[in-house]
Image (cartoon, rainbow, N blue to C red):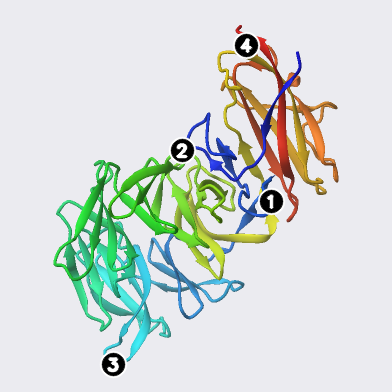
Amino acid sequence: MGLNAYRIKGFRGGIADDAYKGVAGAFRFGYGLDIRGGVDTMKCNQALKKDSGDIVTDLILFFVPASNGKLYGFGNTGKIYRKDSLVSAWVLVYTDPDGRISGAYEYTNNNGSGSYVPYLYWATETKLKRIPLSGNWSTDVQMVGNLNGDPAWHTMTMAIGVLQICDGRYIALVDYEGNFNNQALDVIAGNRTKTILPQDQIAIIGSTKGDKIEEGWLWTWDKQQPSWILRRMIAEKGINAMIQTDFIIAQAGISGGLYYWDTVNIMRFKAFPGGGWVNPGAVANQRGIALFGVTGSDKCGLYSYGRLSKNEPYSLNLEYIPSHGKIIDVEIGAVTVYGDQVFLSWKDGSTCGVDTIDADNKKDARYEGLVFDAGEPELQKGFRHIKLLTRPLPAQCWIKAYYRINEQGDWKQAYLEDGADSFDKEGKTKTVFTIETGDEEDEEKGKGETFELAFDLHPSGNDTPEIIVASTYFEPIGIL
């Protein structure tokens, strides 16, 4: 009987919702893969590098790319940092004596003398403060007013022409003339506003009832009405963050749920593998692709969701993991795009930092394919060889192959016919891994009803291996 082939070709489908099926080019899990750049091959993405040195010592919760060309970061112990250009070092410019800064934004308004100037605004638990963008940090920090108080979040944005600030059960605002109102909107008691998104002539507000109640709400307000206009409930532990690309995306709860909402229809359409959540400041829009910094998962990192053209599927991808290489027990504080470059803040234990893209180096990547059963899950099969067709392999790059039979145990490594554990032959474009060298313990070697394939890709500098197609050859054996 001749051998059949299971082919993996095309990788733009991203991380699938189901272990057994997905859109064309989908895979079960992966990280560090470049699924949107260049031709549709399996390849490594750029690495992240630590950009903050030893300067950043707390977790930045909000970035503000300001109109003066500088990037500001606001930390969870009250420190405020500045970066003057893409190539400049971070500096500590101010430490707020009131501690944790839980919201920040740039907003232009009347300075009280008839001049309209840009300010940096930020909020601690009970106070709203500001400084003129051209001001002196030693002398020009101003107290704007007292907030009602929230120990967690004071996310802020400009919506409907005014600066709107989450403040417990209220929305506070600063208008164009500099007037401050700490109770401009009162949502229903028991809800705490957490995130806010401008949308045409309304503001969309996301709230939570705490980490024990499966009830998050989306509200709309137009600033003209004395109360909110409409609200919709999501049965999750609060609305954590929102972003708009092709459509509005809300991240809700702690199980990684992503929701579509157009202020009428609401639908859960995706979830991060391993669950988790997104802090209010850990979202950004990069050329129409949504970026999410995921915390609280065993697969933390910077995810992307979207598509670059109408002919591609909307796909989820774990684009980057922090520069220290960990995806477990890491908190992502904030994400931004500054000078067309991605920045993210992180905390690992007591260590904090800011990462950005390393344009000179790519990162090791991992690919784990869907579960394959040839459409006959009851039929036993003998899996024999894995053939790779690649672009010419660059020097010092390599590829390792792994497999798993019947979803049992850890991944087992496949070896080349000469016994080598990796394909590392410079300039070569094809190789064959042999599955029979594995050891299934309770199974005969390479035999089972289902099969999974995984790869580790190791780059060198800015060179990466590229797999065009991976073909696993197998034969049907029978029902036993």
Question: Which one is earlier in the sequence, the residue at label 3 or at label 4?
Answer: 3
In space, the residues marked 3 and 4 are separated at their CA atoms by: 81 Å
What residue is disc 2 on?
A: 274
Residue at horizontal 57 percent and vertical 37 percent from the top = 27
Percent x, y for residue 140?
Answer: 36, 84
289 shown above or below 422: below
The 10 Å Cα crowd at callout 1, few under 14, some 14 to 19, many 20 or more, is few
User: Which label sits on residue 442?
Assistant: 4
Specify the quadrant of the image occupied by residue 80. Answer: bottom left
Q: Are marks 2 and 1 in contact (CB under 8 Å)?
A: no
Question: Which one is earlier in the sequence, the residue at label 3 or at label 2?
Answer: 3
In space, the residues marked 2 and 1 are separated at their CA atoms by: 29 Å
Question: Which one is earlier in the sequence, the residue at label 2 or at label 1?
Answer: 1
Percent x, y for residue 426?
Answer: 85, 45
Question: Which one is earlier in the sequence, the residue at label 3 or at label 1?
Answer: 1
Of 362 and 148, the residue lying toward us: 362
Q: Are marks 3 and 2 in contact (CB under 8 Å)?
A: no
What residue is disc 1 on?
A: 39
What residue is disc 3 on?
A: 114
One can see residue 181 in this view: yes
Considering the image in quadrants, where does the N terminus appear?
top right
Q: Are marks 1 and 4 in contact (CB under 8 Å)?
A: no
Percent x, y for residue 83?
Answer: 53, 73
Of 22 and 158, the residue lying toward us: 22
Please tell me whether mark 2 or mark 1 is closer to you in this view: 1
The 10 Å Cα crowd at callout 3, few under 14, some 14 to 19, many 20 or more, is few
